[in-house]
Amino acid sequence: MTSRIAFVGGGNMARAIIGGLIDSGWPAQAITVIEPHAPTAAALERDFAIAVQSQGDATLAEAACVVWAVKPQVLKEVALALRPLLGASLHLSIAAGVTTPSLQGWLASARIVRAMPNTPALIRKGMTGLFAAPSVSEADRQLAQRIAQAVGQVQWVEQEALLDAVTAISGSGPAYVFYFLEAMQQAGESLGLTRAQAYRLAVATFEGAAALAAASDEPPEVLRQRVTSKGGTTFAATSAMDACDLQAHFMAAIQASSTRAAEMAREFG
Ligand SMILES: NC(=O)C1=CN([C@@H]2O[C@H](COP(=O)(O)OP(=O)(O)OC[C@H]3O[C@@H](n4cnc5c(N)ncnc54)[C@H](OP(=O)(O)O)[C@@H]3O)[C@@H](O)[C@H]2O)C=CC1
Ligand SMILES: O=C(O)[C@@H]1CCC=N1
């Protein structure tokens, strides 16, 4: 029988994971959500035919896994409020920055796995970083991994601090890709393409280049060199990027994401 999963918070990321789980064959009847915002709750019920409650009830204790998917800012308050209703479940937190020791204290449980998914989970192309303290059982690790793998690939890390790096690369990463897509679309338009033409070209290019990188044994700088003809168009573009130190700026932006994850642990943990 499929394990019951209860989501606390039914926002963007929970929706992505729920969509991926159902798409991968997880029964809708085995998923419940606690989501107080009525329009969000109604949309989840409509789109996925799952049970959505405005607040927790006794059925929360029946979940094999509770997925904590509220904002880090409110996680402590929500966890303490629901604590009397919790059973002996695994707790899977997707909140950026909130640490295992904080969660252990709020939930009065050591059965905690932290996950850092990303929104491509919605189409089962997610990448999820996972961390569990050494005391967490193999069965709990397997259940967390099963949920994450239902929506894409997983990468375990051995030190909790590395989840901040995962957050900065793959958690926030889809936004970086969309940021570049926006720029490529606007540039294409300014060069005379229609908005739709430019967007289609840009999306297909990301798709194709990522698939090529995934299929290749060669490092990205070699793949880039293959595109770059001597004195040609790509060289003109990458030289302009180098002239404004784009790579260093981009790396600093990723560092800022990781630093923010660590700060959030101090603010909300
Ligand atoms: N978005 C992303 O790409 C990623 C997000 N995360 C993490 O996922 C978590 C959720 O983020 P995201 O989905 O973007 O945020 P959202 O704000 O979209 O979702 C959070 C949801 O929780 C609801 N909520 C608020 N209070 C309660 C409560 N007491 N009980 C139950 N639900 C409540 C919110 O309702 P309301 O709007 O009314 O407040 C909202 O619908 C965060 O901790 C974030 O760090 C992790 C990886 C990637
Ligand atoms: O922006 C955030 O804080 C969350 C975590 C990673 C992606 N979104």
Image (cartoon, grey):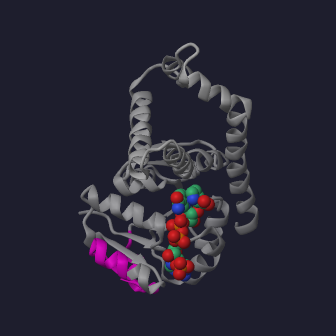
Q: Position of residue 217 (x, y in %)?
A: 44, 20
Asked whether residue 139 is drawn in magenta, I would say no
Say if residue 113 shows up in the picture: no
Q: Split into 4 quadrants, where in the image is the N terminus?
A: bottom left
> In the image, what residue occupies the spot 70% across and 68% down?
268
Of residues 193 and 29, the one drawn nearer to the viewer in this rendering: 193
Q: Position of residue 196 (x, y in %)?
A: 39, 51
Displayed quadrant of residue 65: bottom left
Q: Position of residue 120 (x, y in %)?
A: 42, 52
Q: Position of residue 79 (x, y in %)?
A: 58, 76
**Residue range corresponding to the magenta coloring:** 42-63
Q: Is residue 120 above or below residue 28?
A: above
Q: As drawn, is 108 to the left or to the right of 216? A: right
Q: Split into 4 quadrants, where in the image is the C terminus?
A: bottom right
Of residues 3 and 19, the one drawn nearer to the viewer in this rendering: 19
> In the image, what residue occupies the spot 59% across and 44% down?
169
